[in-house]
Amino acid sequence: MQDCLFCKIIAGDIPSKKVYEDENTYAFHDIAPQAPVHVLVVSKKHTPDVAHAAQDLTDAELAACLRTCAKVAADLGLTEGGYRIVNNCGENACQTVKHIHFHVLGGEKLSERMA
Ligand code: AMP
Ligand code: ZN
């Protein structure tokens, strides 16, 4: 997808701190971390958000995102203490990058508030 920041990161055209990659997903450290661990998990196939995922991704491609979130969390030592997975969809959620992604946050006790 032209002019999509995360498509360019996946392609290697923009540098990122890669954590994990497989055929369906790419994971990298967020540039402005909101917790001691803050990783973004993105689908390699472009779709703007979860609202469009049903038409653009297969169920397996969408599920792969959550599997990668759990794998990355485990690899980074978050499983025992727990972690949060956040997905922003659309304007009211303040989604800034219109390429589906999941935030994996952990490494400390997070706010009880979801937002
Ligand atoms: P969202 O607000 O849910 O769309 O999240 C977008 C996230 O992308 C934010 O947490 C940003 O800090 C992060 N971000 C923006 N540009 C980059 C980049 N070049 N590398 C890593 N993370 C980025
Ligand atoms: Zn994209």
Image (tube, helix red, strand yellow):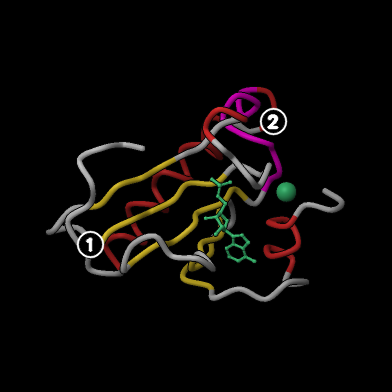
Q: Amino acid at mark 2?
A: Asp
- Residue 8 appears left or right of 80: right
Vertical order, 18 against 70 (above or below): below
Determine the residue positioned at 34% across, 55% down. Answer: 105
Position of residue 81 relative to residue 13, above or below, is above
For label 1, the crowd category at 10 Å Cα-Cα, with few meaning under 14, some 14 to 19 and many 20 or more, is many
Amino acid type of the residue that numbered disc 1 sits on in the rendered structure: Leu
Residue 69 on image: x %, y %: 39, 52
Q: Quadrant of residue 31?
A: bottom right
Residue at screen point 51% across, 62% down: 27
Q: Is residue 66 left or right of residue 50?
A: left
Residue 50 within the segment the image draws in magenta: yes
Q: Is residue 92 left or right of residue 7?
A: left
What residue did someone put label 1 on? 78
Give whichever of discs 1 and 2 has the lower sequence position: 2
Span shown in magenta:
45-54
On screen, residue 54 above or below 87 = above
The structure residue drawn at horizontal position 76% and vertical position 62%, both measured from the top left corner, is 8
The answer to whether the residue bearing label 2 lies less than 8 angstroms from the nearest atom of ligand 2 is no
In depth, the one of 92 and 83 nearer the eye is 92
- Residue sitting nearer the eye, 91 or 77: 91
Give the foreground label among 1 and 2: 1
Q: Is residue 98 left or right of residue 100?
A: right
Which residue lies under the disc numbered 2?
56
Residue 15, position in %: x, y? 67, 76
Q: Secondary structure at mark 2?
A: helix
Which image quarter: residue 115? top left
